[in-house]
Amino acid sequence: MSEKIDLSTNTCPNREQRANGVNIFYGKATELVADARAGKLKHQERAFQQTSGCILNFYLTVRVMTIRDAVMIVHAPVGCSSSALGYRELFKGIRKGLGGMPEDFEFHWLTTNLNERDVVYGAADKLKAAIHEAQDRYNPKAIFIMSSCTSGIIGEDIDGVVADIQPDISATIVPVHCEGTKSRLVQTGYDVFWHAVLKYLVKPPKKKQPDLVNIASMLSYTWQDRMEITRLLGKVGLRVNFIPEFATVEQFEQLSEAAVTAPMCPSYTDYLSRGLEQEHGVPFFLYPSPIGIAHTDEWLRTIAKYTGKEKEVEALIAEEHATWVPQLENIQGEFQSLAPEGDKLDVLGSLGQGRLLTQTPFFNELGVKATAAIVQDFDNLVLDEMDKMIEETGDFDVLINTFQAAEVAHIAKNRAPDIVLSCPFQGSAYKRDKGMTRIHALRGDAREWSTQAGYKGAVAAGNFLLQSTKNKSFQQTMKANTEETYTDWWFKRPNPVYLKEEGA
């Protein structure tokens, strides 16, 4: 993506426009990359669709509500902020004071509770009242205005409201144009959020901080991962600026002062990274992420190039290898002992676009194989990274699938892998004899065994996968006590994607 990010606009293009994103595909990874480079990928329609992802409710409210000295206003019917309630309970499970979790943290969000009358007559006055209420009640440093399908459909002039009321409000008002109808690709939510952050919150650098590393933390990785990354970089004298979850407004303002922006998830970090480099000269890289031993090595070495910490990082890598590599080798040996002679256990992962790039090489490192992967959606932003990964891992099948449980069940039943890794939001295929576990624990898991990043995470994730091959009581119980959700007709179809016929 070479186009300039235009911060004079209210928001950014969606991923379909910006990067030819799609959310339906089944074929080889090499075919996917070749078609994307040739401009052949196109949107298709499913004849049957179970659900989808909303870039407001599912991808942004749960992150924006965690920003420490800010208030989130959801300009929508009250149900559009419902996911914040569930995640509030999940995040409360993280012990206060654990690895930087603030002792006095509370979640603050309001909703304008749009109704039928507001749809007819508009709700600008309601939004203004909510902004004043947020300012008076919490005295925040920033107020995020989250648009919705409803406010988008009626053409609510949110930016006009902000321009009109900002002189009376001490907090910086940040409009985020994240109406659910904006895009089929949930990753568009990342871009519209970072566009707003770049436009309204990031300040020109007062001074560069050569020991500061920006990392978009993205809590589909866990709290333990934040602690592990902080530990590793701290050992070489570097500080981590984790955003957006649980960050302060000042941390957003200082994004321009960092030495480098490093990835946890390249798809999540892309727009922010490019914007910070374009506007403030902050360098970035998008591959690899610190998942697995080898990629953590490379990730640390790349950060070292931008921070002048080459010697310290090499010493750190040697020290960490001495502790963790023998443990990983033991896990590799156990996987090998479980596999048929001359073969490897097969893992099917339900992954986001970023996890496709991080987990698939990690499976290879563990001594298992991934002959197929399930991905939420896909776009042109990661083609170079895909080339690197395929060179490492070899070719494999890819099912691009946004939260379609029937498709997950189809590919899991027909391929019959030894282990199925299920994203909680993509549907699960529990009626099976072989290993079954989850890719993450709804983002609030603060237990050590949930670690995935860094050297400690490589061993923890390896043991977690290994455990799914040994303790099968969950899938056995589910198999014995649940009916088959789908018919044999569905499982006998040759393709797991049920597409509309042309012209239908």
Image (spheres, rainbow, N blue to C red):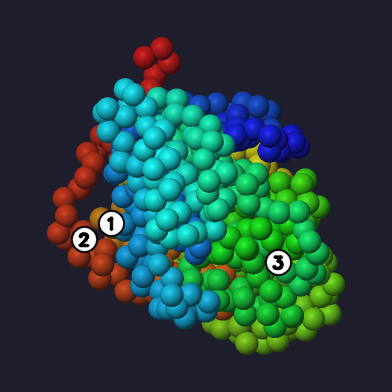
**Residue hosting label 3:** 213
Q: Residue at x 39, y 51 (%)?
A: 133
Q: Amino acid under label 3?
A: Val
- In the rendered structure, the answer to whether residue 33 lies left or right of residue 377 reads right
| CB under 8 Å between discs 1 and 2 | yes
Q: Earlier in the sequence, mark 1 or mark 2?
A: 1
In this view, the residue in front, 439 or 151, is 151
Q: Earlier in the sequence, mark 3 or mark 1?
A: 3
The percent coordinates of residue 94 (x first, y second) are 40, 74
Quadrant where the image shows the N terminus:
top right
Q: Residue at x 36, y 14 (%)?
A: 504
Q: Amino acid under label 2?
A: Met
Res. 124 visible in picture:
yes
What label does residue 430 carry, if any?
1
What label does residue 80 carry, if any?
none
What label does residue 478 carry, if any?
2
The percent coordinates of residue 493 (x first, y second) are 34, 34
Image vertical order of residue 285 relative to residue 150, above or below: below
